[in-house]
């Protein structure tokens, strides 16, 4: 089936419409927010399962997956450098305390203009999925890498550790057709999104743009000496 035929399957349409209708009730403050949010989460997971059942790897999808992998790889490398730069700028500025720069990479909040499905339903579904409305997708709170990427000074973690969780170039193709993907050098973030979040493969293939968050945090105290009271909680002395 074509992707258009897949997204026009009655079960896919019904699930997506139920998700969007539930989001509408949340927006207009009708019903129980927590219950509705949990419903959306479960429907998104079901949607992923049903879409994955219809996915069959071919040359076209392999090319798209490779382009997605390269686009996200390049952006993560840039994010790492910009995070280090933010740390050094804060250090030069004389920011007090233990400085930490944190970088997070999110898939573009704007719906991909190259995606073959350009309906209002598809665009609203992307808004539900991408985190601009709420944190419906588990393990995506900090972006495409589970905890973002942080730098606290000294020798930074290597590019390969960020991309592959290893010093060597790897291929995180677990869960995908092995023969089609054995030579692709897929980064860990692709695996994370595909295997551990409720984004479907059809949500990922056409993403080429990203939203970045890079910020600096610091903490310090104004005490002189040890600021802990060293309380002995083994004693009943109160």
Image: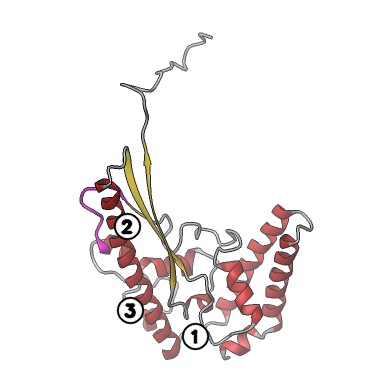
Q: Is residue 117 visible?
A: yes
Numbered range of the magenta stretch: 151-159
Give the image location of residue 89, x and y in percent.
Answer: 28, 52
Q: Nearer the viewer, residue 87 or 24?
A: 87
Nearer the camera: disc 1 or disc 2: 2
- When the figure is inspected, residue 87 is found, relative to residue 192, above or below; the finding is above
Q: Tell me the residue that label 2 is attached to.
A: 83
Q: Badge 2: few (under 14), some or many (20 or more) residues near its Cα, within 10 Å? A: many
In what quadrant of the picture does the C terminus appear? top right
Q: Tell me the residue that label 1 is attached to.
A: 114
Q: Are marks 2 and 3 in contact (CB under 8 Å)?
A: no
Q: Quadrant of residue 218?
A: top left
Q: Is residue 153 magenta?
A: yes
Nearer the camera: disc 3 or disc 1: 1
Residue visible at 48% across and 75% down in the picture: 204
The circle drawn on residue 39 is none
The circle drawn on residue 184 is 3
Counting residues from the start of the chain, the first of labels 3 and 1 encountered is 1
Counting residues from the start of the chain, the first of labels 2 and 3 encountered is 2
Return the residue found at the far top.
237
């Amino acid at each position: 089936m074509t992707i258009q035929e897949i997204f026009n399957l009655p079960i896919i349409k019904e699930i997506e419409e139920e998700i969007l209708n539930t989001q509408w009730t949340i927006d207009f403050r009708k019903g129980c927010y927590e219950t509705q949010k949990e419903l959306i989460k479960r429907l998104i997971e079901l949607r992923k399962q049903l879409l994955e059942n219809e996915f069959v790897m071919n040359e076209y999808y392999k090319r798209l997956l490779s382009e997605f992998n390269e686009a996200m790889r390049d952006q993560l490398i840039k994010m790492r450098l910009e995070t280090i730069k933010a740390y050094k700028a804060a250090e030069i500025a004389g920011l007090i305390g233990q400085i930490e720069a944190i970088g997070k990479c999110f898939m573009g909040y704007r719906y991909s203009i190259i995606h073959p499905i350009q309906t209002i339903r598809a665009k609203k579904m992307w808004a539900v999925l991408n985190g601009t409305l709420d944190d419906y997708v588990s393990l995506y709170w900090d972006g495409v890498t589970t905890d973002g990427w942080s730098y606290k000074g000294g020798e930074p973690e290597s590019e390969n550790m960020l991309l592959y969780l290893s010093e060597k170039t790897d291929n995180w193709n677990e869960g995908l057709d092995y023969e089609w993907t054995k030579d692709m050098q897929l980064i860990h973030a692709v695996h994370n999104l595909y295997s551990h979040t409720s984004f479907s493969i059809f949500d990922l293939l056409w993403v080429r743009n990203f939203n970045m968050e890079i910020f600096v945090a610091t903490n310090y105290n104004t005490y002189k000496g040890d600021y802990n009271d060293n309380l002995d909680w083994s004693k009943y002395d109160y």
